[in-house]
Amino acid sequence: MLNFQSAHLPKIDKRNNKASIEPTVIDEILIIKSVKDYNAENKITMGDQIMLNSLRVMSLSFKNIWKIENLQGLERLEKLQLDNNIIQKIENLDHLVNLHWLDLSFNLIKEIEGLDKLVNLKDLSMFNNQLTSVGGLDNCKSLNVLSIGNNKIPSFEIVTQYFSKGKGMKFKNLQVLNVAGNPFTKEPDYKNHIINSLPNLRYLDYSFIDEAQRNQIRESDEKFRTDAITQEDFLKQMQNQEQEEKNNNDELFKRKSARMDLVEKLSDELIQDEELEKVKTMKGVEEEINKFQEKIKETVENLQKNVIQKNTAKLQSIEVNKFEQAVRAREIKSENETILTIKRFEHQKKLAFRAKERNEDSWKLKLEDLEKETQKLKDNLLSTELQLMVDIEAALGDFDGKLGFITKDMSDYVSGDHGFKKIGDFIREFGTKLTDIAKLEYDRYQVFVQQGSDLSEWDEDLQTLFENKETLLGTVSNIKDNLQSKANTKDTNITTSIERDIKLLVTSYKEKQYERNRKNVLQINKQIEDYTDQIKNQQTPSDDESEGN
């Protein structure tokens, strides 16, 4: 059941119309009625029960809706029509991450916002609203069609500056743009400016743009020649950006795989401390904070580099390759033994069945022997499977031990002289510097107090601390302890995660082998049942044999 909340509904004058419009709230009744109307209009047949959480398309047009709300549980929506309503703000759409098509035309919206999570959005209509600017689309990198026509955007520069050049790389998929009906479209050359600024655009105001037209614009004016970016250049920039994004994604994967993403912002995280904020304005403290952060950043950078290298070596480790090759070799050996065992049985079965077919005197005895051999076959096949499991378990134990050694090496490096031990040294050094500064400032403050001098260079928090030297030094000591505690927690999180990753890797191998073993045992049992049924069928006299007797 969707969650619907009631709200106080104001009366809204659309487009300053004197005739008041009674607003409507989105609720379950409205949604279900809209779905039924849509299905009827499009001749879609559905049962009596409408599964709202499975809806892909919803039309809420011409409903006098004043607020976007109560759409929880509709996460599978791909197309949403909210046009021709009285909506004033884009909101409450974050969870609709599968939306490809969104129509908000003919509303009262003044700003494009609330679309940051809609990364799959391809078609957006904001036609006939009250926009005066363009923005809020930076995360909509898949956007292909955008209509912002019939709004109040005063100049084409607002459009070109947002979408062109550097930012244009974000909107490399934008091929259709409608701006017709904005005040700036009265200027005769607005199209030339937009076409010149967006080299990947194919349609402007729904008119096709070809490269010849683009070249003609470029050659017609010195300004266009200077500012122009050719389609070829644009494509090169796109390729460069895509390669850069791929490299960044690869680096991010490596950092996450080695758990080095956890130290990405360590230098900033460490100094987020309430006690440190109290003494931050002391003379010289900001400088020491900057020095401390630089040392942490350098240490983190080197730590990331070396741990990533160790992790890459772990992933490509010859031990992993050896283990996988050994397991596969043992599986092949087991499969060959199983095939050979079954072939022997099949030969024996063929002889027994042939004896029955030829009505040899010994056929009943041969079938009885075959029946006994069926149980032996089952025992042999299960024994082969069991031995395979024992061998793989032994290999897994050896593999686990070797990976554990690699993991320990990584964990020791993270915690050791090149990692958090070094960071701990910097924290102690930073604490000593703060203590020295605090003592000097305390003495200087006391001199000012004794002389009756102006104390305004120290804020109220510092003056309170300077009333008692022990309290001041205790605060500085707390800062050092807090920083060290954060570093220790981060160290523990990383090393624990690295060890957990190895355990998960080994566990995944175990689960894979367990599943393989389970399927093989089921297959063996099924095969034995089939053989048993075949033998019983041979032992049962046929109608001809019964009549002959």
Image (tube, rainbow, N blue to C red):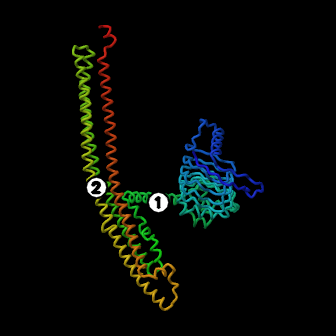
Q: To which quarter of the image does residue 473 belong?
A: bottom left
Name the quarter where the N terminus is drawn: top right
Depicted 544 relative to depicted 375: above or below? above
Residue 501, position in %: x, y? Answer: 35, 54
Residue 234, position in %: x, y? Answer: 52, 59
Does dot 1 land on a helix, a strand or a loop? helix
Which residue corresponds to the image point at 73% horizontal and 57% vertical from the top-left?
15
Depicted 318 relative to depicted 285: above or below? above
Nearer to us in this view, 147 or 475: 475
Residue 339 seen in this snapshot: yes
**Marks 1, 2: nearer the viewer:** 2
Q: Residues within 10 Å of mark 2 (few under 14, many from 20)?
A: some
User: Which residue does the numbered mark 1 point to in the structure image?
Assistant: 240
Name the quarter where the C terminus is drawn: top left
Does dot 2 land on a helix, a strand or a loop? helix
User: Which residue does the numbered mark 2 point to in the structure image?
Assistant: 404
Separation (CA) of disc 1 from disc 2: 40 Å
Amino acid carrying label 1: it is Asn
Nearer to us in this view, 197 or 162: 162
- As drawn, is 403 to the left or to the right of 254? left
Residue 206 seen in this snapshot: no
Q: Residues within 10 Å of mark 1 (few under 14, many from 20)?
A: few
